[in-house]
Image: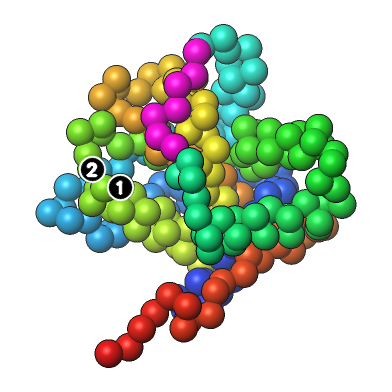
Amino acid sequence: MNVSQAVAERHSIRAFLDTPVSREAITELLEKAARAPSGGNVQPWRIFVITAETMPEFQAFLHSSEIKETPAYDIYPPELKAPYRDSRFKVGEDMYGLLNIPREDKAARFAHLARNYTFFDAPVGLFCFVDRQMGPPQWSDLGMFLQTFMLLAQEAGLDTCAQEAWAMRANTVSAFVQADPDLMLFCGLALGYRDPNKPINALVSDREPLETWAKFY
């Protein structure tokens, strides 16, 4: 698989099979992804892996936790404007349309969102942390690391879903993985094999036409 194929075929998978992913495969992906660009070679990513063996323990801890949560950052700007707001709204409606969940069925929509916290049943979950002293340039490094990881996973026949929703459970996750207090959770990432029989995995988000976001001079 070449890079163009990996980019075209990668999209967020929200229903996984329980097919195991070996530790060797995860290790290889992480080591390769560490070649992602990093300003000043700071390499700010700190990764914690929840394997299939530790997933039940993690889920039990997550659901029994009474730790007070204080998200470290806003996932979206409080006043998200058009056209960004419109794109976010549309992909949400497209997703719930595939799931046959109408807008008025709030309980079903929240139930689906809660599946973020089971990694959509993926056998492996990753958490990407960053030192709290880091700024926007290093956060962009995290994005490049994660994109590199996801494309390498695609090449290896694996699927992924990057999950900023985990920022809402940052304190509990930090407690479970015993992260240093100086580290802040940026996001989670589900890793495994897609379930080909689940309609939600047919969702491919739209992209705006080139002329709306690029200019040639």
Q: Is residue 58 visible?
A: yes
Residue 126 place in picture, x, y as percent: 48, 39
Splitting the image into 4 quarters, where does residue 127 fall? top left
Residue 162 place in picture, x, y as percent: 52, 49
Residue position for label 2: 135
Residue 7 place in picture, x, y as percent: 50, 71
Vertical position of residue 42 compared to residue 39: above or below: above
Quick one: label 2, few (<14), some, or many (20+) residues within 10 Å?
A: few
Residue position for label 1: 139
Q: Residue furthest top?
A: 66
Q: Which image quadrant: the C terminus?
A: bottom left
Which residue occupies 35% across, 36% down? Answer: 129
Type of the residue with mark 1: Trp
Residue 160 place in picture, x, y as percent: 56, 53
Q: Residue furthest bottom?
A: 217
Type of the residue with mark 2: Gly
Residue 12 lies left or right of residue 128; in this view the side is right
Q: CB under 8 Å between callouts 1 and 2?
A: yes
Is residue 119 found inside the magenta-colored segment of the image? no
Q: Please state the extent of the stretch shown in magenta in the rendering.
A: 68-75
Circle 2 SS class? loop
Vertical position of residue 210 compared to residue 119: above or below: below
Q: Main secondary structure of the magenta part?
A: loop
Which residue occupies 52% across, 34% down? Answer: 166
Which residue occupies 73% across, 34% down? Answer: 110
Which residue occupies 45% across, 21% down? Answer: 70
Vertical position of residue 67 compared to residue 95: above or below: above
